[in-house]
Image (spheres, grey):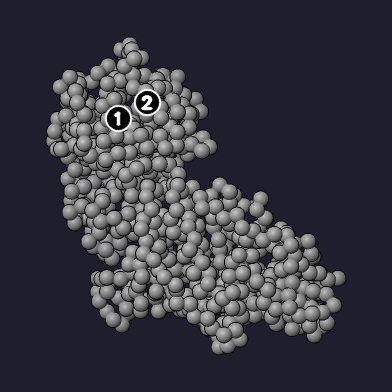
Amino acid sequence: MTAVSTQSIPAFCDGIQHFGDPLPEFEAYGQAPAIAAGQTAITAANDPVAVYQTLLAADALRYLTLQMTASKQSGHPGGFASIAEAIASLVMLGHKNIITEVGHHAPGFYSNVFLDRSLEAMGIETVAQLCDRFRETHGLLGHLSGQIPGLLNPAGPLGQGQHFAMAGAKLHPGVLFPVTIGDGGLGEPYIMSSIGHFTTAYPSVTNFLPILVWNGYSQEHHSMVSTQSNQTMIDYWRGNGFQEVILVDAKDYDDANQPGDYVDSTAFSFSQRFAFTQAVLEATDKAAKLALGGTLTVLIVKQLKGAGVHKRGAQSHNLYPGDSLERDYIVSALTARALTPEAWHLVRTNYERANGGPAAKTVVTESVLPLPDLGPLPLNQFPVGGDKQVATTAMGALVGHVGQQDQQFVVTNADGNAASGINNINQALKIIHPTTDATYFQQPQGQVYEPLSEDACAGLAAAQALFGARTLWCSYESFAINGLPIWQTVTQAMAELRRPTPSTITLFTAGALEQGRNGWTHQRPEIENYFAGMMRNGNVFPLFPTDANSIQVCYDWALTTRNKGITITASKSPLPIRTTFEQTRQALAQGAVELATIAGAKTVVFAVIGDMPLIPAFEAAEQLAASGLGSRIVSVVNPRRLYRPTDVAWEACAEADGDFLDDAGFAQLFGGDALIGVTGGASAMLEPIMLRSTAPRDTFAWKRGETTASAAQIMAFNGITAENFVTRAKALLG
């Protein structure tokens, strides 16, 4: 190592532990930035200067990733290290809208946006600050999030990143959206199935570029695709519809006689490192141009996991306590990757110029996507007490209007809109399908996206919402659980997001009570426990409209919100009209609305979540009245409003919503001599009411499914009957 004068060290390098000697050929290829002043990318992928400085950038990424993680003896350096050349190539080629499917690559992505000065937006200007803020509150969390400047997507569970890349590509033609996919994550079934449906629905949208990080290892062992030959891997992608499969195998450039199919390019001689870097740069350039030019393309880089960091294989995946900056193998790896101050300056200059500036100022998610004005929705208020109406169908009419005003709007549904009482959405917006068939309202140009995968449905809808566009994910309540991981990921990212974006909205239909003859396979309202837990997150609002009037107002309100996750759960059966529009507006603001009061010696309050469970509640009120007992029936539409402010992390949310029903309002709605909480779903949704009520109280809720001939029978199986309500109410009254 060479002694370095502090006067020659760029300010951003403050905190770097080690500086190195110049790499060979620096005098020839390191005298001026490869990206010239006023330019946004290198001029040619085969330019030796560009190749050389891409190699420097890859080493810089590896160095920062390892020092950052070792500074906390925690984090994941190994996976990103094996793809550093490709990430550096993308930047040098001017592409910064980079997405990842791999949350464990977070420290590498932080290094990438640190180099182009994006992290200065959160006060990180030096390497010392980069290390200090890693894995700290209000800093750089262990997996990617929505709050990090310059990074487009959250990344945690595997199998999600492609959704963001496809949504970005759909919304922004002409912009490349590379997405790195780990060979460990490739084992998730969602990736290829979601890509397959998307490319069939949108064959002209090819400007997303999967980049397979084929490094032979997963988190703690060999990856399940590690035994495949190169040809088998190529055939796999071709078999899934990719027209161009570009594979760069580090093994082809190895002059260090490394054993096995996966090798480390940093162990090559310098000339072979240069050759490998050039191959990656040229392959990345070719892949990008093909993808932008209308050809569905994948880039595969095959290089050993942990290339250039402290360990190799799965052992490089994670740092543990004791893996500190003082450990010999950490020091050895850092010194091997260390650059000179001049090289650091060169890398920083290229990164600053690439794509026209820091990613925090240039990538598509750093600005608000313009949206067309929807105008007033064509609300249709049915008369209270009039004919029964299907709530989902009433909402479907509004959804059709939204899509007709906003061409980017998509509706996603895995099980079919017609089956959920919303075939009017298909009629208005058309199912996207390569086969035109008027019988099924399908055609190549449509706005209804119907893959047979809840993950693909939730993925495109949630990702497009995060990227700034309106969407609606529709599902049977019983099957939606398969799409919730990405929906939850996006809602959490929205809570942290530094810009407003349309809320991600869902419609869950055909609840458990309607699916008697289908049995327990279609009776899974336990999903409501999921949303009940998420309510405390601060930006999640499960809505339970009372009827066909109520659902219209709920959807109208949801469309006006930002950075929230809003679930609307309603029946597809014709049910009584019990509320006016104004009553639901009141319920959205206060959490609930009183539907009926019957005077009596004492008052039993029925707090009812859902539309169909109101039927036994009204029957119970009549039976109580016959015994001289009064009742009040309250429809709980927006339970999030019924928590106390201290129960919910609302203050930490972007677009914070701190409106909660006060104690006086709560007492007016729910005060009585006894309280019966009723829901056809999970009991956890009643928690806000049970926490605040001081009356003798009990709950009636879903227990489990069974095959029955009617909704009444399945409710009876779960104890949700008027007779049980009355018996329990009298016991509570003493």
**Nearer to the camera, 293 or 302:** 293
Rendering quarter of residue 527: bottom right
Decide if residue 488 is on the left or right side of residue 370: right
Residue at horizontal 43 percent and vertical 66 percent from the top? 472
Camera sees residue 685 = no
Callout count: 2
Residue at horizontal 55 percent and vertical 61 percent from the top? 541
The single residue placed furthest to the bottom in the displayed view is 387
**Nearer to the camera, 671 or 243:** 671
Say what amino acid the circle numbered 1 marks. Arg
Q: Residues within 10 Å of mark 1 (few under 14, many from 20)?
A: many
Which label belongs to residue 348?
1
Camera sees residue 154 = yes
Say what amino acid the circle numbered 2 marks. Phe
Give the percent coordinates (x, y) of residue 611: 59, 75
Rendering quarter of residue 147: top left
Residue at horizontal 30 percent and vertical 20 percent from the top? 341
In the picture, the quarter occupied by the N terminus is: top left
**Gap in Å between the C-alphas at discs 2 and 1?**
9 Å
Position of 118 relative to 487 (above/below)? above
Position of 568 relative to 537 (above/below)? below
Q: Secondary structure at mark 2?
A: helix
Give the percent coordinates (x, y) of residue 235: 21, 53
Instruction: For the residues labelled 2 and 1, say whether their Cβ atoms are less than 8 Å apart.
Output: yes
**Nearer to the camera, 602 or 301:** 602
Give the percent coordinates (x, y) of residue 506: 47, 65
Residue bearing the label numbered 2: 12
Which label belongs to residue 106?
none
